[in-house]
Amino acid sequence: GATPAAPVLELDNLVMHFGPVRAVDGVSMTIRRGSVVALVGESGSGKSTVGRCVVRLLEPSSGTVRLHGADISHLRRRALRPHRRDVSIVFQDPAGSLDPRLTVGSIVSEPLRLLRLTRGRTERERATTQALERVGLRTELADRYPHELSGGQRQRVSLARALVSSPSLLVADEPTSALDVSVQASVLNLLTDLQRDLGFACLFITHNLSAVEYLADEVAVVYLGTLVEHGPSAEIFATPKHPYTQALLSAAPVPDPVRQRRRSRVVLSGDIPSAIDPPSGCRFHTRCPIAVPMCAERVPELREVAGRRVACHLVSDEDEDGS
Ligand code: SF4
Ligand code: MG
């Protein structure tokens, strides 16, 4: 077969604890050049914390974050600077992430200035104009302030800023969840088009599994700081293997009645437990509808099963449809 694309990001046993809170507890995955990986989980699963470690807004407690093979896990300001242009993030709430005192033009061009990517004002203005046009904003908006824009326009500004340095990886943390439903689709479509045109890899963080079916090449499902299932999107949507993935898919509305019938109806009960004292053994055992006594005792390893990785004692290769 074809050689796989080079890794852009490699996480190796990433751990992020905040005091007693074990937000991320051993996540390993690779994102290859140009591929879109959806990181999916409920709120409190640690998925945003993974994203913040990837862009090094957080320094991991242990484990490694490699960007194009370089270990950036513990680099400080100056040493980190050459890597900053290579990875950007857009947040859920564009109002909170844009400096209200700066004009749109300054917001978008700031990374160019801080990372010294352009020579002089003219070159910077040209790059800024191009970045605004790329996200479908009129260039006259460069002189406006964030509060003068709509939510959808502000998220487009965030995207323009994130992409102005031509990163090879974009972390998108729930980029449409704070927007009016009426503009969510247009921002998601824009992100999809930009990804296809510019070819950056993307870590797309979301609580809504169904939203990523047509966007993601791979899906990684996270529960209480650990990966429970990770593999090609088409296979995970067709035959989810982990009971938690099955539950997330059962909860999602599916327009296709054939596929709906093939999915088991696993209903999640209760809330995600606290990450301060996560359940013993399989962290999902307190909510898992098929748990057996062993599940509370032994931690299931993330194993290769049916073309993906799954962490569940009861999933095996013989188990054809996972139900
Ligand atoms: Fe459920 Fe046990 Fe599998 Fe965990 S290991 S998902 S508790 S069956
Ligand atoms: Mg979050």
Image (cartoon, helix red, strand yellow):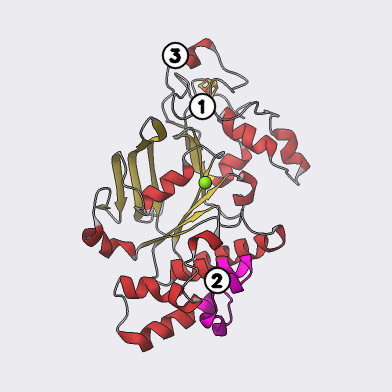
The response on whether ligand 1 sits within 8 Å of label 1 is: no
- Amino acid type at mark 2: Pro
**Residue 154 in picture, x, y percent from top left:** 57, 68
Residue sitting nearer the eye, 125 or 185? 125
Q: In the rendered view, would you say 7 is above or below 292? A: below
For disc 1, the marked residue is 317
The spot of residue 191 in percent (x, y) is 55, 64
Q: Quadrant of residue 17?
A: top left
* Residue farthest along the top direction in this orientation: 293
- Give the residues in magenta: 131-154
Q: Residue at x 44, y 35 (%)?
A: 225
Of marks 1 and 2, which one's residue comes earlier in the chain?
A: 2
Report the mark closest to the observer, 1 or 2: 2
Q: Earlier in the sequence, mark 2 or mark 3?
A: 2
Residue at which label 2 appears? 146
Q: Mark 3 falls on what kind of element? A: loop
